[in-house]
Image (spheres, rainbow, N blue to C red):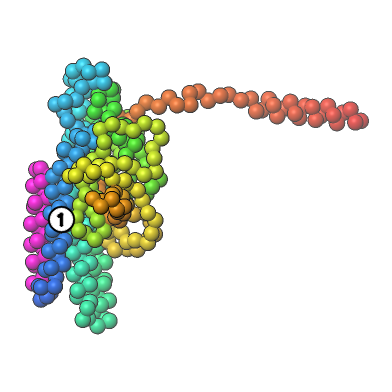
Amino acid sequence: MSNKNVGQEFTEATKKLATGTANTLGAAGQLATSVSNIAITSGQIGESLANTTKDVVEQGGIAAVGITTNTGKALTAAAGTAAKTVETVENLSARLENYTKEAQKQAQIENETATLKTQNANNVDRAKIEADRQAKLQEIQNDLERKQKETAAEQERLLADLTANQTQAYLDTTDNISKQKNAYYYGFTKNNPGSRDTGFKKSSMPFSKWCYSYIPNSFLKSDNTGVIDIIFPEQVISGTRPYEISALNRRTKEPITITFRTLQKKNWIGQPYRGEVSVIKYMDEQNNNIELEGTMDYHKIWFVCPTNNRGGRRRRTNKKRKTNKKRTNRRRTIRKRY
């Protein structure tokens, strides 16, 4: 099933849930307006996820037809097998992104529903409403965590089934090298990262040569007024990764900057904590500097880890011999005193 179909189905499901909730509460007007906004936002996210494949290709993802070796030679059979496996693995990532967005919207509906119920409720009823809300949010979170673990396990299994020859053959493809660079310059080690969680991580499978990274894909404004789809310039920057990441608005091709800001916020099930929030900065048509807080959506990419020979062999030092020499001199000094 395509990302677009999943997004459309989720939008329809959200609308149905909104209608049913409104009828149950008997406050259709107020709740329908609130949940309608959620459905609209969900539709925007679904449409954004429909472009995931295109975005991933532009950002160094899988384009099996066009993959060649770094020297421009045709793809070998071994590298082709690895490329198809990575394509399947990243499709699982896109599916998990849909699961995550669905869970977030369900949690938002539960929060708004509970808030509406408590408006005219007494203290006893409010306590029950709050308990029910927490129970439903925990259920949503548990279900999402289960899907995350299942997806990660399936991805690890698919990559582990590749032979060493297939993995090595994929290492030098233009696709793999491009994703290595994107992971270094634009990637994060988590799908809810802070400013220090940059780069990529190695697979948890023993002896695995595969790495993964989370690349910014879209940005949901904190007021739920819209989504900014993100791509990166074709020319990969050189040198050390900067604190602020330069990117492009996929729709307008205007330059934007991705950064973080520390503040008090709530996680997706409503629990408060102090952490970092994603920030998008850009200049509008009137040359005004705009800064928007919101939630970043990430796409998980997989690639063969880069070979790192930095540092070379560790220089040997004979500290013990140096220490013994000092002790010997000290003993000689003591003997002379007597």
Residue at the (65%, 28%) spot, across then down? 319
Q: Does dot 1 land on a helix, a strand or a loop?
A: helix
Residue at the (37%, 42%) spot, across then down? 198
Q: Quadrant of residue 139?
A: bottom left
Relative to residue 64, is residue 247 drawn left or right?
right
Residue at the (18%, 64%) spot, across then down? 109
Badge 1 density bin: few <14, some 14–19, many ≥20, Cα 10 Å: many
For the stretch drawn in magenta, the main secondary structure is helix
Residue ranking furthest to the right: 338
- The amino acid pointed to by label 1 is Ser
Q: Quadrant of residue 270?
A: bottom left
Residue ranking furthest to the front: 286
Image quarter where the N terminus lies is top left
Say which of 307 and 162 sits in front.
307
- Asked whether residue 261 is drawn in magenta, I would say no
Say which of 2 and 287 sits in front.
287
- Asked whether residue 16 is drawn in magenta, I would say yes
Residue ranking furthest to the bottom: 122
Relative to residue 25, is residue 196 drawn left or right?
right
- Percent x, y for residue 285? 23, 50
- Percent x, y for residue 131? 26, 71
Q: Is residue 199 depicted above or below 294 in this figure?
A: above
Q: Quadrant of residue 66?
A: top left
- Percent x, y for residue 260? 36, 51
Q: Is residue 111 visible in this depiction of the protein?
A: yes
Image quarter where the C terminus lies is top right
Q: Is residue 39 depicted above or below 195 in this figure?
A: below
Q: Is residue 152 visible in this depiction of the protein?
A: no
Residue at the (81%, 29%) spot, across then down? 331
Say which of 178 and 113 sits in front.
178
Which span of residues is magenta-colored?
1-23
- Percent x, y for residue 59? 24, 36
